Amino acid sequence: KNICLNFEKALGVVSKEQILTQEATVNACMDTLHKGNGAGNDFLGWLHLPSSITDAELTEIENTANVLRSKCEVVVAIGIGGSYLGTRAVVEAMNNSFDWLHANDRKNPILLYAGHNIGEDYLYELSEVLKGKQFGIINISKSGTTTEPAIAFRILKKQLEDAVGKEEAKHRIVAITDARKGALRTLADQEGYKTFVIPDNVGGRFSVLTPVGLLPIAVAGVNIRELVAGAVAMEKATDQSVPFAENISAQYAAVRNELYKSGKKVEILCNFHPKLHYIGEWWKQLYGESEGKDGKGIYPAAVDLTTDLHSMGQWIQEGERTIFETVISVEKANHSVVVPTDEANLDGLNFLAGKHVDEVNKMAELGTQLAHVDGGVPNIKVTMPEVSPYYIGQLFYFFEKACGISGYILGVNPFNQPGVEAYKKNMFALLNKPGYEKESEAIKSRL
Ligand code: PA5
């Protein structure tokens, strides 16, 4: 069984015929992707990544994860953007929501995150919480030069070395970076850390199925073989040889682009499963960085429902009609909680007594879908049978493949991110980084 796509409720603003006429365009984009003759073709390593990961590679990742698991109560995954979000998406989806409270009966180390912000208070609190704990670090940066993770690593490396000594620290630090370039590569080689390589041809936001995601996910105790197996199944299901009528990545790419052309400029990824919050964050990065360029691109937003129906629900129902929704619908909950009967029935909820909470959630989901469609919000539905590593693997690949196709339909290079450099340049100029003297002078004259 695979995840599936239903866009019946997205029809109206765009018709089924209109979508079907996109088949040739979509096939041409898919062909460009598979032949590797389009923009950004040096970053297509993700396309066959799931099926090309070897058993030996997975074993090496698992072995390294086991070393960290045996030595550490806490492992800090340092990274930002594509070097962070995929891990967090899987771990938050699979781990117990109250993980940090299971301090005494843990099978897995607690995974914490750093390097995804420059919050002084965040880093202070992290460093305080690590005091007296056995911790390790996975430092992830493809370029090896990103400021946010580099600052976090400098602080935590010192703390670890002060706590356990330089020699032991070496065994608790793993670096994941480029094979040759970047400050992190130099540092890791010099210090003698265990390292994993991020392939040159895999960009950050497409890297969750490399050691970038697989190592910290394995440390957290999630089965990475199932994750990869799910991605392999989706690689097959969305292959170029699979016709448009059955190819869900091709269809999703076509539908969202037709909606965009008809004036729907914002896509909201919705979940009805609080544990999928970071899947939304991962997806936002994937589509935002891939498509938002050259003055074009659907703005990717995300909401957690029903939570956000009590905040953003009003806007979605009646605000500017430039939005459409993509709902990740989960067929079955992993646990069972039933609404109890209450004799007094003061809250009037006895009509729900005996029902599973998920049944109520499902009706909220269905009711929301129909209400939003009635309110002029086209609705695409992606159904996953359950929240498991296997189906998250499928979801990752489904969205990645669709993103590649979609970027080409839009006419952009989905694999670069030139726009993220602008803030860095200004920040370095403002901080008087050596080499930025001219920029420093220019920017300061604007203040
Ligand atoms: O998708 C991308 O390429 C980016 O979001 C990067 O992942 C992010 O900027 C982190 O880069 P790096 O891994 O080089 O530190």
Image: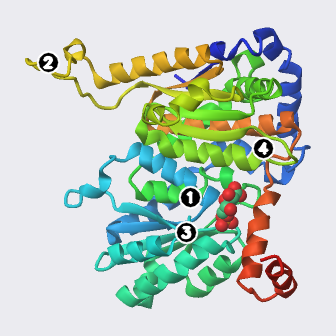
Residue type, mark 3 in image: Gly
Question: What percent of the width, then of the height, locates residue 233?
Answer: 59, 32
Q: Is there a contact, CB below 8 Å, between mark 1 and mark 3? A: yes
Q: Is there a contact, CB below 8 Å, between mark 1 and mark 4? A: no
Q: Distance between the residues labelled 2 and 4?
A: 52 Å
Return the residue at label 3.
Answer: 115
Residue at far front of view: 447
Question: What percent of the width, then of the height, locates residue 429?
Answer: 77, 80
Question: What percent of the width, then of the height, locates residue 344?
Answer: 9, 19
Q: How far apart are marks 1 and 2 (CA)?
A: 46 Å
What crowding class fits label 4: few (fewer than 14 Cα within 10 Å), some (14-19), or many (20 or more)? many
What crowding class fits label 2: few (fewer than 14 Cα within 10 Å), some (14-19), or many (20 or more)? few
What secondary structure is found at the residue carrying circle 2? loop
Sequence-first tag of 1 and 3:
1
- Ligand 1 lies in quarter: bottom right
What secondary structure is found at the residue carrying circle 3? loop
Asked whether mark 1 and ligand 1 are closer than 8 Å, the reply comes as yes
Side of 251 where 51 appears, left or right: left
Return the residue at label 4.
Answer: 291
Relative to the observer, which residue lies in front, 290 or 86? 290
Q: Give the foreground label among 1 and 4.
A: 4
Sequence-first tag of 3 and 2:
3
Residue type, mark 4 in image: Glu
Return the residue at label 2.
Answer: 345
Residue at far left of view: 343
Residue type, mark 2 in image: Asn
Residue at horizontal 58 percent and vertical 71 percent from the top: 149
Q: How far apart are marks 4 and 3 (CA)?
A: 25 Å
Asked whether mark 2 and ligand 1 are closer than 8 Å, the reply comes as no
Relative to the observer, which residue lies in front, 63 or 346? 346
What secondary structure is found at the residue carrying circle 1? loop
Return the residue at label 1.
Answer: 84
